[in-house]
Image (spheres, grey):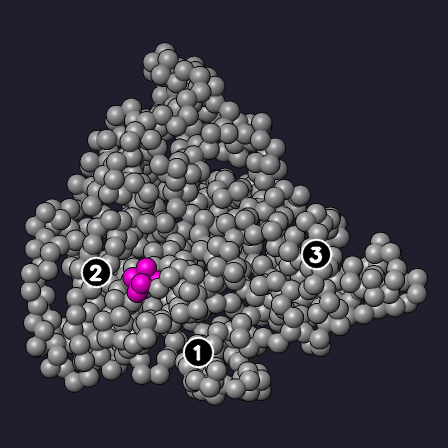
Amino acid sequence: MEANKVKRRDFLKVAGITGAFFAVGFESFALTGGKAELKTLMPEDFINGVPMNPFVIIPEKGKITMMAHIPELGQGIFQGIPAIVAEELDVDMDQVEIVKSSASRAYGRQSIGGSRSVRTQFTPMRKLGATTRDALLRTAAEKWGVPVNECSTDSGKVLHKSSGKEITYGELAAEAKAQTLNKEVKLKEKKDFKIIGKATHRPDLGNKVNGQADYGMDARPEGLLYATVERCPTLQGKLTGYDKAAAMSVEGVVEILEVTRNVYGKRNTGIAVVAKNQFAALQGRKKLNAQWENAEFSKVDTEKLFTDMENLSKDLGMEHVEKGDFAGAYAATDNRLDVVYKLPYLSHSCMEPMNATVHVREDNTAEVWASSQSPQVHRTIAQDLGIPQDQAEDKIKVHMPFMGGGFGRRSMNDSFEECYQISKALRKPIKLVWTREDDTQQGPFRQGTVHRFAASFDEDNQPTGMQTKMVSQAITTQGRDSRGRIPFEVMESINTHYGFENMSVRFNEYKSQIPIHWWRSVFAATNGPAFEAFIDEMAVKSGKDPLAFRKEYLKSEPRFVKVLERLEKESYWNRKLGANEGKGLAIVESFGTIVAQAVFLKKENGKVSIPKVVAVVDCGIYINPDQVKAQTEGNIIFGLTAALKDPITFKNGAAEQANFDTYRMLRMNEAPREIEVHLIDNNEAPGGVGEPGLPPIAAALMNAVANMSGKRLRELPFDLQSV
């Protein structure tokens, strides 16, 4: 059941309120002190019971409500966080109803990215559940006049076994809410978990399959107008003119106005066409005939970008790690490897296009449907409308619908920014939807990177030193000086655990006008594939099996070794391959999780296929194994698409790809016929899951190609059939 579909009887329970249903929320008139005033109702307004805290509401009878306060974009957090609370509260998941919360500071930080939701919420949410359970337990003990240590809990009840007494949480909630909370509560041991670590039904999936789930695109407030924005094709440029009259002549078009969006300090101007329906808006946009002054940016092209980065990779760069004396080891021998890897710019291409719906009203209140990874936009709106911050959440209501993918792109609120400006100007509810072409061509993009590797070997071809120099733009220093410091994000997943006696890891920042942004697994998506492909080159040159080579040089890291040993077993790595077959592997740590993958290739009748991919994941304690496996499978497909399909290329300052005909996705007949995912069971702290399954797959694929064909590919993407 979609928990946010409010039942009629729940609506009628809200005293003194009548009104109309607005797709995701309600606007209603309430009588306050004899005066009718408009009130926007949110999901929290329709929940019955005692709010033990903002996250847990316990009714006298019926299911306990738990708020899903983290934006859900397919990573499974809608069910994941409530499952953590339910575990320590000691209730079964079928006793829980999960409701999507609104965006509110009552829930703390609600932005997501970096696979951090479970990593950062695991202990706080456990403590919240345990603290709530403790208050209920003490309330029951006081009611019965028995020591609290004689009481226990199970499935939403407090039990006193010696007397046979039991009482439900619902019967205790009102009194328990008044308890002073214990700051120190004992958490369950892993062996006692009933929910965490077990496959658990996800209640949001049914309606996502049948189309009834509410996504950002589904917001339909009354009086809605539709907007589309024409932007400079070269990402930056000055608007010099457009034909407003021609666009306004299209039936249904009601307004044309200029808007801006902030892209890392640069204000990009666009022309918004507002209409009564989406079709009219798009037709009006076609007639704008916009002119731009963009001579400087039109000089940007892909060939120059990568030529500049490759030249920069020859410089020594900034030091990240220096172990031993790589320069000395390298100079002492002619037995070397020197290679360059290149990875392309890419689009995020969420299946649900970028969108936002905003209604700024005449009375300076606002309602937002935030299809965003950063939905807490109250402060931004309040500052612009002159609303005191302590009144922001009373006057600004923000819904958090499901999102059809995010991959980091939805952490930038530029679509909201544009939509807000339109609604503020017109004081009407506005839905802004980016077209697929907008999304593909406007960016921001995943960074393109160049990796220069060098390794030295002794007379027996055993490595004596290894160096990597990575060249890229950085996300966090776009438009400003990095002041000689390496931006924190750029060195992710360069594995300095390898036990080479001499090791050098360096970075050179490349400055470009191309805007880049967090893309699924961020720099692990580029560092991981390049680094692990070069490790394979070192293994082959040393005459050792690539898996054995990694075990040897990672022997000081037992978690890595255990993952490799499990991969060796589950993939039957040591089994002899047949003719025209190949295998490759890679192991990458990112966001607190270690993932190793083995890719198997086979060439039959002149066509190369991927019969099987085997993945082993060590993410520490996991909440729902099915979700870990699903995310890893999705990451593998995502990563194979990045390795085998189209890059984003630039010519005359504009992206050349526009839609899924020129920026293709992996098709079902190209996907691995079988994907196995195996999880390591341990007591380590939870790592991320939404991203770490992506970085190894491209390296494992490149290594499998080299193993099968003898061709060492060092540039992505490539055509698998060409090998």
Report the amino acid beneath label 3: Thr
Specify whether residue 705 is painted magenta: no
> In this image, 553 relative to 502: left or right?
right
Q: How crowded is mark 1: few (under 14 residues within 10 Å), some or many (20 or more)?
A: some
N-terminal-most mark, 3 or 1? 1
N-terminal-most mark, 2 or 3? 3
* Secondary-structure class at tag 1: strand
Q: Name the residue under label 3.
A: 180
Q: Can residue 248 be seen in this view?
A: yes
Q: Which of marks 2 and 3 is in front?
A: 3
Above or below for 204 versus 16: above
Where is residue 467 drawn, in percent x and y? 38, 25
Magenta residues, start to end: 381-386
Q: Nearer the viewer, mark 1 or mark 2?
A: 1
Q: Can residue 88 be seen in this view?
A: no
Quick one: 661 or 382, which is closer to the camera?
382
Spatial CA span between label 2 and label 3: 50 Å
N-terminal-most mark, 1 or 2? 1
Q: Residues within 10 Å of mark 3 (few under 14, many from 20)?
A: few
Q: Residues within 10 Å of mark 2 (few under 14, many from 20)?
A: some
Q: Name the residue under label 2.
A: 260
* Secondary-structure class at tag 3: loop
Q: Name the residue under label 1.
A: 39
